Every structure is written in C-alpha cells, then in structure tokens.
Amino acid sequence: MFTRKKSRTAGALLAGTVAALVLAGCSSSDPLDPGAGGGDDTDAPSDTIVVGSQAYYSNEIIAEIYAQALENAGFEVERQFNIGQRDAYIPALENGEVDLFPEYSGNLLQFFDPETTARTSEDVYAALPDALPEGLVVLDQSTASDQDSYTVTAAFAEQYDLAAIPDLANVTEPLTLGGPPELAERPYGPTGLLETYGIEVEFTPTGDTTVEDLVAGTVNVANVFTADPRIQTEDLVVLDDPEGLFLASNVVPVANADIADQISEVINAVSAALTPEGLVALNVQSTQDQLSAEDIASQWLEENGLV
C-alpha cells in the first residue's frame, strides 16, 4: 500500500506537529523497544486521493482511468465526478477537496491567463506552470486533445492528399467551411484561416448539423472537436494545425503539488498511452456502445498494459 502524509490546512499541520511531539516524548529511548521511533512509512496514516471530473462523459472516462490506475498501484481513491465546470472545480482543487483532475491545456491556461498568446501544444504546456496558482501543478500532457479543428472526410483527404490545413491550398474546387454561426467572428474562423494560412473559404453556418453536412457534402471542411466520436464512426480526418490557428487543448492532469511526486509515475504513464485516436475510440465506446466509464477504463488500462 502506498501511503502519503498530506496537510490540507494550517490547523491540520499544527495538530500533526503536536501529535508527533507527544508521541516522541512518550516513546522509549531503548533502540530494542518495538515502540521506539524510526518506524517505516507504512506506519504513517494513509490519505485518500480524490479524483474529480467535469460533468462531461469524455472527461469522466479519463478521470476513471486515473482512478483505476492509482488503485492498481496501491493508492486509496475517492471519486468526485460530474462536479461541473471550472468555476466549480478549480476552487475545489485549490482548497484541497479534490487532488487530481483531467484538464485541457489551452482552456486551463486561458482560465488563469485570458490574455495568453500561446497557441501551439508545446507553448501552451510551457506556459501553464507560471499561470497556475501556488499549490497546483500539471503532470505530463497527453497527445490526445479535445479542441476545435478543421476536419474533412477521409475521401476528400485522399482525393487531394490532405493532412494539414496548409494542404487545403491544393484543393481545386471551392472550399466551403461549415460550423456554428459564431465561427464567422472567431479569430480562428474564415478571417483567421485566410490570415494564417492564406486559405480562402466560403462560410456556411451549420450549427448542430455540422458533421452531417460534412458527410453529406454540403460543406467540404468543418469545425469539429478533435475528440468527437463521429471522427471514427463517420471516417473523418482532422487536419494538422502547424501554425497554431486553434488554441491547443491537450489532455493534461492537474494535481495538488503535495501529492504530485507520489502519483506522477502512474499518471504520466496514462498520459503517454492516451493518443488522439485512442480518446476518440473511448468516446465511441461511451456514445455508441453504451459502456460505462468503469468498463471502458478497465478495458483501456488492460489493453495498454497499465494494469
């Protein structure tokens, strides 16, 4: 069993110090006395690691993976899932009610630094340590992400040899971009696409039917989130964004600093194994196969050799 000592408040720290002094005063000075000091870490009180999640099925799956991985490593875990959005769970992380949470790098950075100019995955991750409040740290980020993207059908990608957004310049037919109405005014919308990549498109507001319109051919480029399960089920291709038009939002664990070192090996191994395609597949198991987060997580951990 892994154990840890954790101080959540100044009062708890003081109480622990007093208790330690009392015990030291009462213990025997005889080194042969079993009650003498110098006991190993297994005698220390074991705290429970509280893993939280947003009220979002994909985030809950990742949180469940963290929880099961920690339990397999010998930690005691409590789950506090479906907490809500950042204004609800960030205070819980800061005050120690929650110890570990799956986050998204770009959105997390903007929460604490709304004026950030970081956009690429590497720059966003590098900016997080300075942006986070004292007491919170990020562990290794995953290549998996849940962010805006420009996406095409596999057939369209094959026809024009498309792998990244700049490749759209090679398309010989008019480009029609579909997405929510507000995309027209977003910095990564048609204007940003033209300014960053020199790609000119006609914009068609598609709202909730964006993926359906893409598959039907009403539009040939669409604004789709990278973890959308329909990327797998509809055979879509997410175009790489080398210039960082979109704010990168990789899956990243945020943890209380006082436990980060003890759990990092376990959680970093999860991050290393979680890929973009893998996250989409997990979401398909939830939305299409109707599996529980517990079953999805245990199966994923087994398939990736982490249990």
Image (cartoon, grey):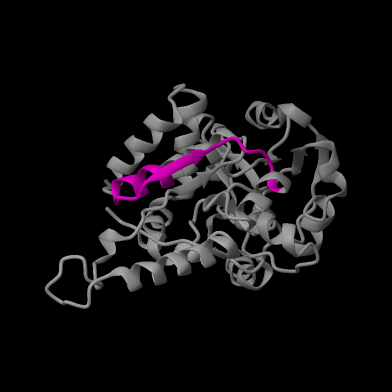
- Asked where in the image residue 219 lies, by quadrant, the reply is top right
Q: Nearer the viewer, residue 263 or 172?
A: 263
Which residue is rendered at x = 68% and y = 61% of the image? 109
Which residue is rendered at x = 39% and y = 37% of the image? 297
Q: Nearer the viewer, residue 288 or 65?
A: 65
Give the image location of residue 40, x and y in percent. Answer: 24, 67
Residue 161, can we see it? no
Give the image location of residue 23, x and y in percent. Answer: 35, 67
Please determine whether, in this image, residue 85 is positioned above or below residue 289.
Answer: below
- In the shown orientation, is residue 177 left or right of residue 150? right
Check the image and name the residue furthest to the right. Answer: 185
Residue 78 located within the stretch drawn in magenta: yes
Which residue is rendered at x = 76% and y = 38% of the image? 179
Disc count in the image? Answer: 0
- In the shown orientation, is residue 304 left or right of residue 136? left
Residues drawn in magenta: 66-86
Residue 57 located within the stretch drawn in magenta: no
Residue 4, can we see it? yes
Please determine whether, in this image, residue 219 is positioned above or below residue 23.
Answer: above
- In the shown orientation, is residue 185 left or right of residue 168? right
Please determine whether, in this image, residue 65 is positioned above or below residue 105.
Answer: above
Q: Nearer the viewer, residue 84 or 156?
A: 84
Please determine whether, in this image, residue 47 is positioned above or below residue 58.
Answer: below
Which residue is rendered at x = 75% and y = 69% of the image? 117
Give the image location of residue 293, x and y in percent. Answer: 45, 31
Give the image location of residue 215, x and y in percent. Answer: 63, 29
